[in-house]
Image (cartoon, rainbow, N blue to C red):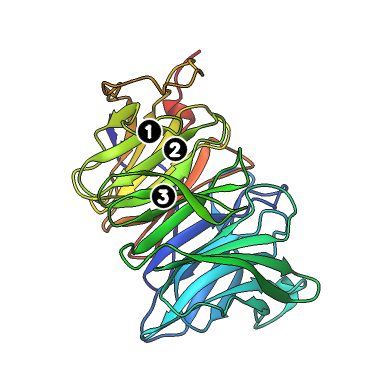
């Protein structure tokens, strides 16, 4: 089903790639997004969906010193978030706090909580503990995985452990398993690597070229979704990494990002460089037995495309489901346009 945008729009001043749901804000549906301007002072926008769902309101606008390549909101404090940023060839990562009385300040400044400054390679992303209050944080650069202990009250971050993925692997992104907090998935040029944080060792891999992004199904254990340059969207059962269990067509150009819905089973958003956002319903079925004995590919190539949002003028790099209202998502195209949509019209009738 093809369709233009019927959503609510909001424009940033500069180009942008990353947007995050403010999960800890239980009173409002709100998002954080950051800009990617090479020459100008960059900005972090805190935006809120109005109670009637008809308007996106700027709740806070904060200057940020560098280009923002990754942004993630803290799951337990709505005023705290992380960014990965660059200035020329120099990359950094930091945890920030929005000032408490930011709405009453004429020019509110972000407060630095901690700098994740142990990296010597190009930093890719920061991952927060999947749910609830916890001091653990992960940062990923092209060669290494770091596990941090963050103390927001003392404004310190200390490396707990570190491991190299090896010179032959160039890490690009990752996701933290919400069902097993000891497991993370890391993407690189030729595979998805599964890591155990207790031993900081690789426990398995999916040999699949050019995986851009991964996300775990929040409702179904052992289920990982990948977005790949040319071969679309794959759904994997982590108990058998030989073949995907579902193969979705993906996009007409590179599939860049995937996000699993936090509440509805099998609902997946994907976005890419074809200037489209696709909404899929892809449930692997109810069989929870381990499929280790399979020798033939069990892949089902299905096309459960519920809707394609195609009213964009540029590549779409940012996606975020609302945790508070899981039928709502925000998308961000490279030209700095935020669109918030409701998927209610496209949900299957029970």
Asked whether the residues under the numbered discs 2 and 3 touch, taking CB atoms below 8 Å apart as contact, a structural biologist would say: no
Query: Hey, which quadrant is residue 200 in on the image?
Result: bottom right
Which structural element holds mark 3? strand
Q: Which residue is mark 1?
A: 235
Label 2 environment density (alpha carbons within 10 Å; few <14, some 14–19, many ≥20): many
Asked whether the residues under the numbered discs 1 and 2 touch, taking CB atoms below 8 Å apart as contact, a structural biologist would say: yes
Asked whether the viewer can see residue 97, the reply is: no
Q: Is 277 left or right of 101, judged from the image as shown?
A: left
Label 3 environment density (alpha carbons within 10 Å; few <14, some 14–19, many ≥20): many
Residue 119 at what x, y percent from top left?
A: 50, 77
Residue 253 at what x, y percent from top left?
A: 19, 48
Q: Is 228 left or right of 33, judged from the image as shown?
A: left
**Inter-mark Cα distance, 1 to 2:** 6 Å
* Picture residue at 30% right of the left edge, 64% below the top: 168
Which structural element holds mark 2? strand
**Inter-mark Cα distance, 3 to 1:** 15 Å
Q: Which residue is mark 2?
A: 224
Instruction: Please state which of residues 304 and 106 is positioned toward the viewer in this rendering.
Output: 304
Give the mark toward the camera: 2 or 3.
Answer: 3
Specify which label sits upstream in the sequence, 3 or 1.
Answer: 3
Label 1 environment density (alpha carbons within 10 Å; few <14, some 14–19, many ≥20): many
Query: Is 189 placed above or below 113 here?
Result: above
Query: Is 50 placed above or below 249 here?
Result: below
Asked whether the viewer can see residue 31, the reply is: yes
Q: Which residue is mark 3?
A: 193
Residue 139 at what x, y percent from top left?
A: 53, 65
């Amino acid at each position: 089903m093809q369709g233009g945008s019927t959503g609510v729009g909001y424009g940033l001043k500069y180009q942008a790639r990353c947007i995050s749901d403010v999960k800890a804000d239980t009173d409002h549906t709100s998002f954080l997004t950051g800009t990617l301007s090479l020459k100008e002072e960059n900005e972090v926008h805190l935006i809120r969906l109005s109670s009637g769902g008809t308007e996106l309101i700027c709740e806070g606008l904060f200057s940020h010193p560098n280009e923002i390549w990754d942004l993630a909101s803290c799951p337990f404090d709505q005023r705290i978030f992380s960014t990965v940023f660059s200035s020329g060839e120099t990359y950094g990562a930091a945890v920030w706090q929005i000032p408490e009385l930011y709405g009453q300040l004429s020019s509110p400044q972000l407060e630095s909580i901690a700098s994740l400054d142990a990296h010597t390679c190009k930093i890719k992303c920061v991952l927060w503990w999947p749910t609830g209050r916890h001091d653990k944080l992960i940062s990923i650069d092209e060669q290494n995985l770091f596990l941090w202990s963050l103390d927001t009250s003392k404004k310190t971050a200390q490396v707990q452990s570190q491991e190299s993925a090896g010179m032959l692997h160039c890490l690009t992104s990752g996701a933290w398993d919400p069902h097993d907090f000891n497991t993370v998935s890391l993407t690189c040029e030729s595979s998805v690597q599964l890591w155990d944080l207790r031993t900081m060792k690789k426990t398995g891999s999916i040999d699949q070229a050019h995986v851009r992004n991964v996300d775990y199904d929040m409702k179904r254990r052992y289920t990982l979704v990948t977005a790949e340059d040319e071969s679309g969207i794959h759904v994997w059962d982590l108990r058998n990494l030989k073949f995907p269990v579902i193969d979705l067509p993906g996009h007409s150009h590179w599939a860049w990002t995937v996000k699993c819905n936090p509440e509805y089973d099998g609902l997946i958003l994907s976005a890419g460089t074809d200037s489209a956002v696709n909404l899929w319903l892809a449930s692997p079925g109810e069989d929870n037995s381990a499929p280790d004995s399979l020798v033939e590919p069990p892949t089902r190539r299905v096309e459960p495309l519920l809707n394609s949002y195609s009213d964009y003028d540029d590549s779409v790099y940012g996606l975020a489901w609302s945790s508070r209202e899981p039928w709502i998502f925000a998308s961000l195209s490279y030209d700095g346009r935020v669109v918030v949509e409701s998927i209610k019209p496209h949900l299957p009738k029970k």
